[in-house]
Image: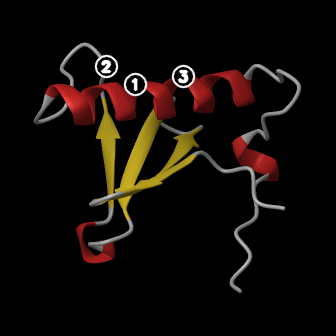
């Protein structure tokens, strides 16, 4: 089961990962994979209040996984499975 933080609802289809090299959280838009990963900074937010709230949640979930909190998978152990 994939435990990589995702948000899929309405027009938003986002996925997040923790980049250990840069010690940052990156978010990708599954609707526009050609955009690649974008480093998310919660102090800057996103382009709207709704998107900022979504990205903040994804950011928090990535950090919890890196801390080893039960129910969250660290970046080094995440595997995407194509169905």
User: What residue is rendered at 40% in x and 24% in y?
Assistant: 56
Say the numbered circle drawn on residue 42: 2
Marks 1 and 2 close (CB-CB < 8 Å): yes
| Residue most extreme to the front | 10
> Considering only vertical position in the picture, is 2 above or below 45?
below
Q: Earlier in the sequence, mark 1 or mark 2?
A: 2
- Location of residue 31 in the rendering, given as x and y in whole percent from the top left corner: 31, 72
User: What residue is rendered at 66% in x and 50% in y?
Assistant: 4
Q: Which residue is mark 3?
A: 60
Question: Could you tell whether 4 is left or right of 27 in the image?
Answer: right
Question: Could you tell whether 28 is left or right of 1 in the image?
Answer: left
| Marks 1, 2: nearer the viewer | 1
User: What residue is rendered at 32% in x and 65% in y?
Assistant: 36
Picture quadrant of residue 45: top left
SS state under label 1 = helix
- Location of residue 11 in the rendering, given as x and y in whole percent from the top left corner: 27, 60
Q: Earlier in the sequence, mark 3 or mark 2?
A: 2
Q: CA distance from mark 1 to mark 3?
A: 6 Å
Q: CA distance from mark 3 to mark 2?
A: 10 Å
| Residue most extreme to the left | 47
| Residue most extreme to the bottom | 83
Say the numbered circle drawn on residue 12: none
Q: Which residue is mark 1?
A: 56
Badge 3: residue crowd in 10 Å (few <14, some 14–19, many ≥20): some
Marks 1 and 3 close (CB-CB < 8 Å): yes
- Location of residue 19 in the rendering, given as x and y in whole percent from the top left corner: 53, 42
Which quadrant of the figure contains the C terminus?
bottom right
Badge 1: residue crowd in 10 Å (few <14, some 14–19, many ≥20): some
Question: Could you tell whether 39 is left or right of 4 in the image?
Answer: left
> Considering only vertical position in the picture, is 11 above or below 76?
below
């Amino acid at each position: 089961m994939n435990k990589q933080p995702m948000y899929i609802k309405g027009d938003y289809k986002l996925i997040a990962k923790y980049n250990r090299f840069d010690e940052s959280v990156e978010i990708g838009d599954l609707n526009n994979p050609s955009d690649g990963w974008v480093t998310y900074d919660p102090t800057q937010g996103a382009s709207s209040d709704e998107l900022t709230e979504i990205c903040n949640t994804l950011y928090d979930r990535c950090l919890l996984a890196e801390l080893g909190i039960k129910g969250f998978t660290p970046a080094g152990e995440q595997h995407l499975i194509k169905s």
